[in-house]
Image: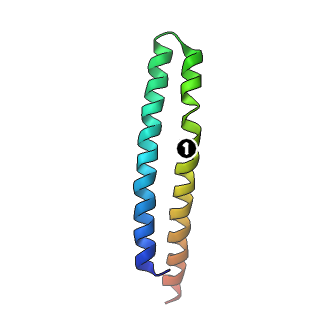
Amino acid sequence: MTPEIADTVITDFLKTLSQKLDEAGQVAKAAEACANAGNPRKAVEIIMDVEQLMFDANTLLNGACLLRLRFKCDQDRD
């Protein structure tokens, strides 16, 4: 993989990461509204939908960081 391709992949990862976090924020707001309306049990049920989104976001973050590290190390050698 070239550094240019890595930059494109990192950019795509970060775009998707942002989308996942936005979606997680929407779910969290819905859960909060439910709890504020007096139904905390349903709120917990709703917030559980955040788990997969956060896992995906973390995986994308790790991928972007690994690519950055990989190509930073290559640049340090030049």
Query: How far across and down, in percent of the image, does residue 51 sit?
Result: 59, 38
| Along the line of sight, the residue nearer the viewer: 26 or 71 | 26
36 w.r.t. 16: above or below: above
Question: Is 70 left or right of 19, judged from the image as shown?
Answer: right
Q: How is the image coloured?
A: rainbow
Q: Residue furthest top?
A: 38
- Residue depicted at 54% across the width and 26% down the height: 46
Residue at image position (43%, 53%) is 16
Kindly give the residue lying farthest to the bottom in the view shown: 78
Q: Nearest the camera: 19 or 74? A: 19
Q: How many marks?
A: 1
Residue at 56% over, 59% down:
62
Instruction: Quadrant for residue 48, please give it.
Output: top right
Q: Amino acid at mark 1?
A: Met
Residue 20 locus on image (x, y percent) = 46, 45
Say above or below: 27 vs 8.
Answer: above
For the residue labelled by badge 1, is the local secondary structure a helix, a strand or a loop? Answer: helix
Task: Report the residue marked by disc 1.
Answer: 54
Q: Is residue 21 above or below residue 29?
A: below
| Dot 1 crowding, Cα within 10 Å, few <14, some 14–19, many 20+ | some
Residue at point 43%, 76% (across, down): 5
